[in-house]
Amino acid sequence: MNIVVFDRDDTLSKSFGIFLESYGYHVMVSDKFQTAISLACSFKTDIFISEYLEDDPEFLNHLKTIKQDKPDLDIIILTCSKVSPKQIHDLGIPMIFEKPITPTLLLDIISKKKHKNSVQEIFQ
Amino acid sequence: MSDNKDSRQNVNEKQKELLQNATLRHLIKHNLKKGQNTKLIIVCLAIVGSLGTVGFFTFSNNDVVQNEPEHMKTMLRVQNLRGDTVSTWAAWKILEEDLFHVHVVDSAYATKERQDAILDTIMSLEKIEIDDSLLHKGPKGTTSTYYMGWYGALNSINNTTLHPIPKNLHFHVTDKGEGDILIELNNMPHPEGISGYTTTVIDENSHQILKAHITIYNVEKLSMPQLKTIVRHELGHGFGLGHSTAPEDLMAPQITTAYPYISECALDTIEALYNDLGTDEVMCKK
């Protein structure tokens, strides 16, 4: 299973990478959103974990484009702010979590995906 | 605005701490052996730090045939959790009787044929004598021994070392990600054209390897001899070896040898590493 992680905080994206790789997942990380999108679109990617860019007005448009290009890609949004998730929900992205996310919860989500259950089942 | 930024930094720091603790707990649970747990937990949790050794291995010639010169570019990078490049050495620290698990992740690409090729690279006892003149190591008529598999190679080391060298290798196909060294095959090309990639997580203070993860890219374009050569090289990183300055060695950054096998030089280096000599630089006898 291939995962792309984006966070502007370089050490945080690497921490996610090392954590997930220690569980045997193949992870690519980036601290640049465009690079992360490019990785997610260029390679067979199962899950895209992204920080919410509250100060980037184009963020939602980028998410929309990714969902159109890769409808099967599961996107997990991590946010520090009390963002209204409605707009993201409307894009078909039900997984929005406030940081810090518990590592075991993150593993649960990914593990469900790995075993071909819909990740949405966990949260509905 | 500034408050938001500070708040974001605080939350991110908390997230890092959670991830690093969870990673260390997982690695300790799966990799530390009896009698070492308490000591290492103290060391690890005190520093909450680990290093990643990343080894890259690239084919520049995808049509190489074994026993014909192979021109393969490799790169080795050692980095810590913050992405800083560091220079250090590390070895596994296990008990002599422990099984050492080298596992392959189950996937559509881990076919029976590839599993057998990897198994051979790990468990083979086969060795060959090669004339030193062919590898510019000595005059014609003198020979050196080379090993096809790491089991045969490591078990040829008879000297007792300060830390036991992993010799009881165990091969298994897994879908859970456990194992001391984990090998994953996939068919994605690496953006930099790399064929093999080893990440080794180590504890910086104790120079101890905790886990090694090998990824082989573009596997369907590799012949079985190529796959064996890559896995043999990456496993060298997995056991703690860096790159050799000898161009004819399997562990050389630029592999040009027609004999990509485990050399006595590599084994001398392994012996030095597990004797805790404080370096991974060893002058080869030949």
Image: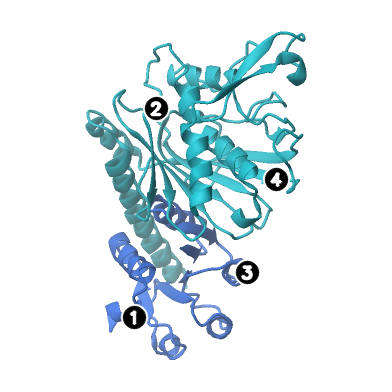
Chain colours: A blue, B cyan
Task: Pick the residue in front: B77 or B182.
Answer: B182
Residue at 69% across, 37% down: B66
Measuring from the top left, give residue A54's x and y in whole percent. 48, 78
- Going by the numbered disc 2, the residue's amino acid type is Pro
Task: Tell which subunit mark 1 falls on.
Answer: A
Task: Pick the residue in front: B133 or B251.
Answer: B133
Q: Earlier in the sequence, mark 1 or mark 3?
A: 3
Q: Is residue B4 above or below residue B204?
A: below
Residue placed under numbered mark 3 in the picture: A42
**Label pair 4/3, CB-CB below 8 angstroms:** no
Residue at 76% across, 15% down: B133
Give the CA separation, mark 3 to mark 2: 39 Å
Question: Is label 4 in a helix, a strand or a loop?
Answer: strand
Residue placed under numbered mark 4 in the picture: B59
Give the CA separation, mark 2 to mark 4: 28 Å
Q: Which mark is residue B140?
A: none
Q: Nearer the viewer, mark 3 or mark 2?
A: 2
Q: Left of A57 or right of it: where is B205?
A: left
Give the CA separation, mark 1 to mark 2: 44 Å
Residue placed under numbered mark 1 in the picture: A120
Measuring from the top left, give residue A27's x and y in whole percent. 49, 58
Residue placed under numbered mark 2 in the picture: B166
Task: Tell which subunit mark 3 falls on.
Answer: A
